[in-house]
Amino acid sequence: MSQICIRVKDLLKTYKDLIAVNRISFDVRAGEILGILGPNGSGKTTTLKSILGLIEFDEGTIEVNGVSVTRQRKEILKNVGAVLEGARNIYWHLSPRENLTYFAGIRGIPEKAIRERATYLLESMELSDVADKEIRQFSSGMKQKCALACAFIFNPSILLLDEPTLGLDVEIRRTIRDWLLKVVKEEGKTILITSHNMDFVESICERILIIRRGEIISHETVKSLKEKFSRKHFRIDLENEPQGRLLDEISALGNVSASGRSIRIELETANHLIPLMRILDEAETHMLDFRTVENDLEDIFLEMIREEAE
Amino acid sequence: MKFVNLIAAEAKMLYWSLRRYMFNTVAMVAVMFLIFMGMFWGVKTIGGSGVTEDSLDSMLVGYVLWVSAMLALQNTGTEITSESERGTLEQLYLSPMGAEKIFFVKAVINMAFNFVFITAMLYLSMAATGRWMNINLLYLYAMVLLSTLSLVGISFMMGGIGLIHKRIGSVNGILSFGLIGLMLLPTYPMTPYAFLPFVAGAAAVRNSIVRGHVYPMWWYLFIAGNSLLYLLLGLLVFGKMEKKARRLNKMGQY
């Protein structure tokens, strides 16, 4: 078992009458990527900023590598990098190289000490060709990659990322995902990540926390979550859009969501397929396609959020 | 050594920004110069023969003082507002050096740039008006530094308020013009106005350079004490406001 890198215990943060984070506890182990999922306003960013000491919390303790954030915040910051506002975290009127030099400098690191690392980061983020160009002219994805490079310039062992893929296209998301997986694998970095992008979280995190209204409603591995919610889902494409009585009859067999000519149905057992086929046959509805669908993280997330709300 | 690297980083940042916004830099010098020339010719035209050489000299030094005071006063408050607007403020707070140290170094670097700026303004104005004064630049710099440190303190207070309320440009504007009134107040040997920030130092600079007044050492110590007091007060208020901003999660929100 790897050592605990970040330990959050009974964290409570309130704003007047609103409870932003309600006594949550969790650990992040060294060398892992932990994902925090939750709807808007669930307390994800508050948790991240509390770990960084950017928010003063009411109760509880946060320790990073055994050091208390309330007592020795500056000590903690020597090993922690963060991207909190995405591409807005960097100076757009400067070039990537100038940004890297500046962010190292305000940590007391001289330019010559980071020259090699800056070149490495610019290369791995595919920014070498534009290293001396003004960031203002860049696409959102390039700006985001530059912000990540700046957070990594002093070689921190821990990285906290708030919505790192927000508004980015698939290609950039993939580059960022591959790069984060690489630094965890090759350099043993620890990453705590919040995201709305389920595919991204599923592809990068081994463990995830699901937060709702400031409380943890799930804290387990992606694998065990999927096992827990592994009900049979089927997707059926019909010739005509199912409506009225037909839809009511199908809905009686299990949870159904219909979209145009496609229906997605959750059945407790595959035996329920027989009455389903009978209903479709009686309605003289032709099936164009039929397949089994595995629950993805998005389904599980939505289901958990729905269950909690009920 | 880390502190030296921080100073180097801030100096580079200022250089990169000035270079990137070269047009704005040149325009700033031109506008300040044109304002002075407008004032100078206005006073000469309206005052006619009643305007003495002393009053023109006083205006020249007063203007230079006002410019440096204004730049010192607006420094930290404006920096915090623009960092917050950009989204980079929280990154500064993630430095183990401490944001207050970063902002202090920013203020010092900007002040050093202001020295270059006011020297250029001074000589440009003297050349344009044909009024050449014999100025001890070292004395001028030392006194400007001594007296404007109090305004750096006020600027930190404004910066702290900026952390919570974000937009403080209008207050900064009022304070900047209020400085003109402050600079005309009598302070020596000892009036209640001398306890205000910047006032005693500004009067001492003007009277020494223009009228050749010589002040006793205790008066300079008083000016230094006044500046130090306001600087510490500014840092204290900044610290309190920063704590409040952390409590209210206002650090990164604009």
Image (tube, grey):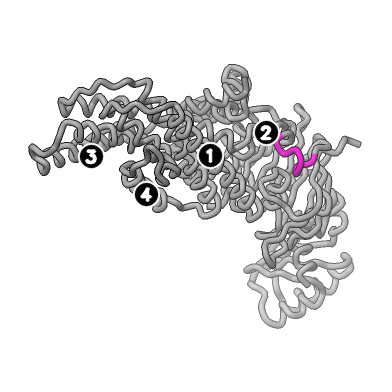
The chain identifier of the residue carrying mark 3 reads B
Compared with residue A119, is residue B65 higher up or lower down, i.e. above or below? below
Q: Residues within 10 Å of mark 4 (few under 14, many from 20)?
A: few
Q: Position of residue A245 (x, y in %)?
A: 71, 82
Q: Quadrant of residue A90?
A: top right
Query: In front: B101, or B148?
Result: B148
Q: Quadrant of residue A255?
A: bottom right
Q: Give the Cα separation between the discs numbered 2 and 4.
A: 47 Å
The chain identifier of the residue carrying mark 2 reads A
Which secondary structure lies at badge 3? helix
Q: Amino acid at mark 2?
A: Trp
Q: Position of residue A279 (x, y in %)?
A: 78, 76
The tag earlier along the polypeptide, 1 or 3, is 3
Quadrant assignment for the N terminus of chain B: top right
The chain identifier of the residue carrying mark 4 reads B
The tag earlier along the polypeptide, 4 or 3, is 3
Which secondary structure lies at badge 2? helix
User: On the image, numbered disc 4 is attached to which residue?
Assistant: B173
